[in-house]
Amino acid sequence: MNLLEQMHDGGLSPAEAESIFDAWQERFHAGEVSTPWNEQFEFSEFEATAFLHGATLGDLVKLRYEGWPTKCRRCGRDINYRLYGWVFIPPDDEKSRLEHIFCGPHMSNIET
């Protein structure tokens, strides 16, 4: 089931999509299904990574259909989501954001 496509096309509201995801999770933990969630809902490996970083299903729809950021929100340098080395930063406005792992605030106490 391509959950993000159905949300984008208007076949599912965000609440309906979350309900489907939650119901699948319950079935998975009950041992009723064994397909990994990212395969079940047809997430790319990059979408799955962003989801694990805290992206909502709505964030993933925006990333898939409006495009991934091409600049790090912290340092402004180019960022390529296909090369990893990034974390997803939940948006504080309508724009999804990526940061390089090595320039994010979570790395400020690490010596280089």
Image (cartoon, helix red, strand yellow):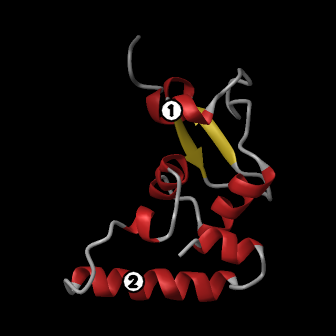
Label 2 Cα crowd, 10 Å radius (few <14 / some 14-19 / many 20+): some
State the image coordinates of residue 41 (x, y, percent, origin top left): 50, 70
Residue 30 can be seen, yes or no = yes
For this rendering, which residue is in front, 52 or 67?
67
For this rendering, which residue is in front, 96 or 28?
28
In this rendering, is residue 92 above or below 8? Answer: above
Occupied quadrant, residue 58? bottom right
Residue found 71% across the figure and 20% down from its top = 77
Residue found 55% across the figure and 53% down from its top = 47
Q: Which residue lies under the disc numbered 2? A: 24
Task: Locate the C terminus by quadrant.
Answer: top left
Mark 2 residue element: helix
- The numbered disc on residue 63 is none
Residue 92 can be seen, yes or no = no
In this rendering, is residue 59 above or below 1? Answer: above
Q: Earlier in the sequence, mark 2 or mark 1?
A: 2
Outermost residue toward the front? 1
C-alpha separation, residue under disc 2 versus residue under disc 1:
28 Å
Side of 70 relative to 101 (left or right): right
Side of 79 relative to 44 (left or right): right
Residue found 69% across the figure and 55% down from its top = 64
**The residue under label 1 is which amino acid type?**
Tyr
Q: Which residue lies under the disc numbered 1? A: 84
**The residue under label 2 is which amino acid type?**
Trp
